[in-house]
Amino acid sequence: MASLAESGQQTPIVVVLSPDHHDRYLVIDGHKRIAALQQLGRDTVEAVVWPMGEAEALLLDRSLRFSEHETALEQGWLLAEMEQRFGYSLDELARRFDRSVSWVSRRLALVELLPEAIQQQVREGKISAHVAMKYLVPAARINPEDCLRMAAALIQHHCDTRQAGQLYAAWRAGSAVIRQRLLDEPATDVPEIARAEKAEPYRQRILELFSVCKENLVRVHEELTAEGAALSYPALTAFCRKQGIGQAPVVVAGQYHFEPGEEMQHDTSPHEVTLAGKKRKVQTASGVLCYSRMLFFQCYPTFQRFDCKVFLTDAVRYFGGASERVMIDNTHIVVLRGTGREMVPVPEMAAFGERFGFRFVAHAIGNANRSARVERPFWFIENNFLVGRTFNSWEDLNRQAREWCDKVNSTYKKHIRAVPRELFAVERLRLKPLPAWIPEVYRLHQRMVDIEGYVALHTNRYSVPVDWIGRRVEVRETKDKIEIQRDARNLVTHTRIADAENRRIMLAQHRPPRGQGIQRPDPHPEENTILEAAPEMAGYVAALKQRGHKTPTLALRQLLRLVREYPREPLLAAVREAARYGLYDLDRLERMILRRVVRDYFLLDDGSHDD
């Protein structure tokens, strides 16, 4: 009030239009300022009108309020108002508040089930909200009067959470007489109720059967029952849990501390998305800076070494620098041999890391906690980003993924109590700067142009000029382009299709004029080579093109291989015999050649003479 009297109103209140009276407003935020201005005798107040309904305004106001910490009761009142007045379900409230359904249910029970007297004690701080929700709410469901008496006992003896839990457990497990005695004469240290274990007399037999039945408790129980033991299966399993029979020892996970710029964790996970109207599996590659929790991910049809280098290049560009090391999970894409600390990366990947100044390291097999920074976001991606979203193409999918990363990295995270992008402002200064020039990631393929003027790559076919038919070309595949090069002066560039779709891509300049079609070269390049090596086979080659069972191109390539691999005389003799009988099965022709090679070039001892 003093600041209002001295400086006037500095921050406007927030209001929305009343749904019942269009000339009136409902106050969303600013009730205290209105009360203070009324005490000062002011009759006007500055306000901002939000163009939305009351329910949406209440939720937005809560999301924008960072200064005041809401108590569990205040949260419960707001949730009850949203549930009762506006008809929100528990699931909808959980989604709106970015909490679990259990979190919403506990706070609603705090204000709906507890008597008003206990709520007042929670407001005054005599009973913690945690104790009220965990112990008093269940007691109120069973017996409201006992709940009031339990609350009075907790206040009288100043019980902490552990003591309150002991009192509630004893009350819950006791009979009506024991409950009455506990609440009449409560003690700060409530003794635990010791009950005899029904399975204790059979302990030694259980241990023997547990080994014989190969740790199958169902079979252990069947054998005990057959021997006359009066023991239920739940009692057996409870006894085994308490005694540690068949239970793996609990191992403390601990925590890992990372300095700014020290490590980025990288991993992949399969997810199902709706792409171009069809559901399909994709590989989601993710990278997380361990200090700031900055997240970057992209999706790919498959994830091979080429895709790994493409992703890591995009990741360091997104972060504006590289960390000292990149943690992986012993994937064969990076690992040459060894695991964990003994891991040796593939030289190609080691050289790729040196380009940006980082090195690859791997965690021990089975130690998933070591890569928890990157494992946790996969659940968030599947249950947040992918839910309800559809994508037109791979470009659209990865563009939306990048935009979602920008949004998530600018959002407050309660588990780290900070905004990742704010922490990244510190970490970015410790990242290794990017090189002045980043070469494009690519992989090379050797291909032969087919008879239709296409080059096949990952089931897709890319067009080239017609005069390239039968020529060997080099294909350079990058993230976005396919470059087909015949020689230093002849290059064709296509837009890369990320998925194997069995598509044909024809560039306009490669399309022949209407009515002409593709002018196939005649003779074939293989035919010229065959006739140069063996002119005597001209008649057989011409007949093979007309009467062969295979396409002329494949048949001529197979015949050229025979010409190059076998001696001339057996080859020509076999071809003459095949032409005389009209045989154009080249596999059979090859067997005929081999019989002549064996007869003419290998002299075998038939045992007709003595040495």
Image (spheres, helix red, strand yellow):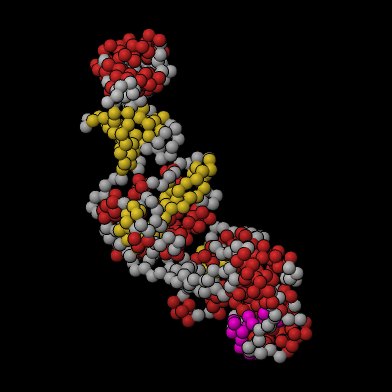
Magenta range is: 155-171
Residue 263 lies within the magenta run: no
Viewer-proximal residue among 134 and 477: 477
Viewer-proximal residue among 527 and 67: 527
Residue 167 lies within the magenta run: yes
> Could you tell me what secondary structure mostly forms the magenta stretch?
helix
Instruction: Locate residue 504 relative to residue 573 in the image: left or right.
Output: right
Viewer-proximal residue among 185 and 574: 574
The residue positioned 53% from the left and 40% from the top of the image is: 277
Q: Is residue 231 above or below residue 396?
A: below
Query: Dividing the picture into quarters, in which one does residue 426 lie?
Result: bottom left
Instruction: Locate residue 186 relative to residue 589 in the image: left or right.
Output: right
Where's residue 447, x and y in %? Answer: 32, 31
Q: Is residue 122 visible?
A: no
The residue positioned 29% from the left and 58% from the top of the image is: 358
Q: Is residue 277 visible?
A: yes
Query: Dividing the picture into quarters, in which one does residue 220 lie?
Result: bottom right
Where's residue 154, x and y in %? Answer: 65, 86
Where's residue 239, x and y in %? Answer: 65, 73
Where's residue 578, x and y in %? Answer: 37, 13
Residue lying at the far right in this picture: please name it: 177
